[in-house]
Image: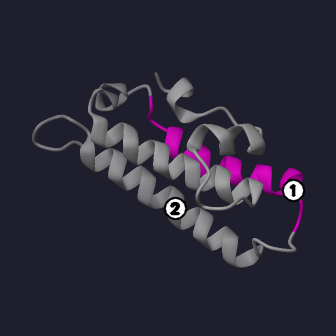
Amino acid sequence: MIDDRLNFNTQVDYACEKAAKAIYVLGRIIPNNAGPSSSKRRPLASVSSSIVMYGGPVWVAALKTQRNRVKLSNTFRFVAKWSASTYRTISPEEVCVIAGMIPISFILV
């Protein structure tokens, strides 16, 4: 998806929305509390993180804007939060450490 200004905002929005939908559907199958352990959730979370990172090398220029970095970070935080079954008030870096995932700010930059 290429927009008129070539800043890939629509691509970032689409990837984040698709990943959030995937986690939402998986979350309906596997409940957040009293469900399987995080070792069983991690492969399911990798599906969503792969959706977010797909095409990353192509639209790496989109990460120059603060808007896109925040959008990707929030989506990746949501994936890691679901994988680790943590509270929503946890920071993105902390939840990635608990979930055993690398923060997206280190992956795409």
Q: Which residue is mark 2?
A: 20
Residue shown at 51%/45% (left/top)? 52
Image coords of residue 64 (percent x, y): 29, 26
Category of crowding for the residue at label 1, using alpha-carbon neighbours closer than 10 angstroms: few (below 14), some (14–19), many (at least 20): few
What range of the chain is rendered magenta?
A: 36-56
Residue shown at 50%/51% (left/top)? 75
With respect to residue 42, does 69 lie above or below? above
Considering depth in this image, is 22 or 99 the residue closer to the camera?
A: 99
Q: Main secondary structure of the magenta part?
A: helix
Q: CA distance from mark 1 to mark 2?
A: 19 Å
Q: Which residue is mark 1?
A: 40
Image coords of residue 30 (percent x, y): 77, 73
Query: Three-letter amino acid code at disc 1?
Result: Lys
Residue shown at 73%/55% (left/top)? 83
With respect to residue 20, does 92 lie above or below? above
Image coords of residue 11 (percent x, y): 32, 46
With respect to residue 56, does 51 lie above or below? below
Q: Earlier in the sequence, mark 1 or mark 2?
A: 2
Q: Is residue 16 left or right of residue 102?
A: left
